[in-house]
Image (cartoon, rainbow, N blue to C red):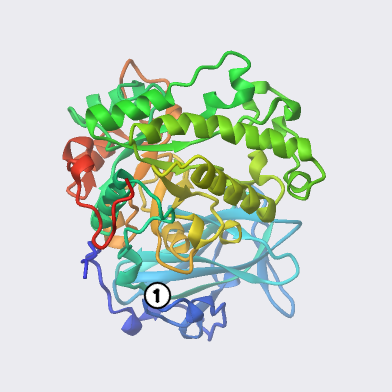
Amino acid sequence: MKKRVRQMEAALLAAGICLGNTAVCTASEESETASDWLYETVVSWEDAVIIEAENGVLSGNCRVKSGKTSYVEGFQAEGDSVAIPITIKETGFYDIAVSSKNQGGYKENYLLVDGASIATFPTESKDAFADSVVEYVYLEEGDHEITVSSYWGWICLDCIKVKPANQLSDAVYEIEPKLVNPEASDHAKRLMAYLCDIYGEKFLSGQYCDQGPFGIENACIWKTTGGKFPAVLGLDMIEYSPSRVARGSEGKAVEYAKEYWEEYNGVVTMCWHWNAPEKYLTGTWYSGFYKDHADVNLVEIMNGEDPEGYDLLMSDIDAIAKELKVLADADVPVLWRPLHEASGGWFWWGADGAEAYIWLYQTMYKKMTEEYGLNNLIWLWNGQDPEWYPGDEYVDIIGEDIYPGERVYTAQTDVYRKAVRYGSEPKMVVLSENGCLFDPDLAVRDGAMWGFFCTWGGEFVTLNAGFNTISEQYTEADMVKKVYESEYVITRDELPDLKNYPLPEDTESAD
């Protein structure tokens, strides 16, 4: 059995939490019915303790609203907050539930521990208090302060609930290197086998760099780290979108992908900011992947009310498939991440709900796999919400895109733990886009073993910096060095010969 790298194994069932004004808490029991492979130990929310919000320290406009149920309101502006002191008797990992309701629609606000922001939590319920859980927060023995602070504001806060965290099972990290495409190429199988072999033990470094292997982002990393390059090169198929090609765009991502694999033994991941077909562009043409600049009704296309729209979308997929076929013919495996960040709703492919999106994703999978024989693709799903999950049979890897702010080096463990629950069977989870880097030591401690990270380009690396000099707005140079020098992080020079990596056992060659 593969060993997990996570080195902090606290016996949390016996952990003690000391909180003022505690009471029995009833919260969601979703984790109690989780799949057998997910958790090693489960702690019920019935064993949690709570602190009423009115017993915290109120700042700004926050005030107690008394009645049958007392709560705190007045989250209106920056600085409005409630700080709750706690004493932890045993170092370990804890789940924190914020019980709140909104005042006029969906809201998000900050949860801080000891002054450091650890998450933004949603408040979706208006009529009744409901829990939003932040999982697996590391707390050392001693005194701490949990704070709810206004970001969006306009919530009523009832209480904070704390319990020892559920422990993930080793099965979460033990991924079988079996791709969903039964005709997957040998090189795709080899790459997946390698990813599975290191999963739970190491992180692949990655960087989006539109200018290719030696573009400005990679140059900045090379200069900052004294000669290191990322193992994964991120590229975008945006310029191959027909509505951009019609205006003179020329894509180079395929050329760069081939170069990174063939010349430098690097790993390639690709997304596609799908510029909508010309018919649907309503705003700035080069921003036609945003819903605000394209009027695409996926529901009408899906149900047959817009047959021309269906033909246009299929034609666009054809154009991208033909470009990817160049890589398939060259035997270049690709971590393919189409229709990303759908549940956010800002891209047109996510603007009409989960059902229409899933239809489009599955249609693309079938078209690219069955019609074009793109057996070099490893399918990386990045819908970011379980309701948008297209099914285990369409997903090789699950990706999350996280932009937590500036110089936030936490491992985003809460998001990782939620992502491992998307499928009905274990799937590898990766950080398919990130703003700032995470501290690999914290990720190992927390068990947030992202298969790889891939930092977005532009301002997150280079903007407003000198020539080939890292911008420290999001990640300081010292943290970049720490990440790329970490024993847990694999850089390009540390990759094995991926073209000759052993094929998974009991798998016949597809070539």
Q: Looking at the rendering, which quadrant does residue 217 occupy?
A: top left
What crowding class fits label 1: few (fewer than 14 Cα within 10 Å), some (14-19), or many (20 or more)?
A: many
Please give the residue where the numbered disc 1 appears in the rendered image. Answer: 166
Q: Position of residue 453 (x, y in %)?
A: 35, 44
> Front-most of 462 and 1?
1
> Front-most of 474 and 213?
213
Q: Which amino acid type corresponds to the residue marked 1 in the rendered image?
A: Asn
> Front-most of 250 and 430?
250
Secondary structure state at the residue bearing disc 1: loop
Evaluate whether residue 151 shows in this view. no
Tell me which residue sits at (33%, 70%) in the image: 171
Horizontally, residue 203 falls left or right of residue 238, namely left
Evaluate whether residue 440 shows in this view. yes
Horizontally, residue 441 falls left or right of residue 248, namely left
Q: Looking at the rendering, which quadrant does residue 443 occupy?
A: bottom left
Residue at the far right in the pictured view: 305
Tell me which residue sits at (42%, 26%) in the image: 253
Of the 4 image quadrants, the one containing the C terminus is: top left
Q: Position of residue 268 (x, y in %)?
A: 35, 36
Q: Looking at the rendering, which quadrant does residue 67 occupy?
A: bottom right
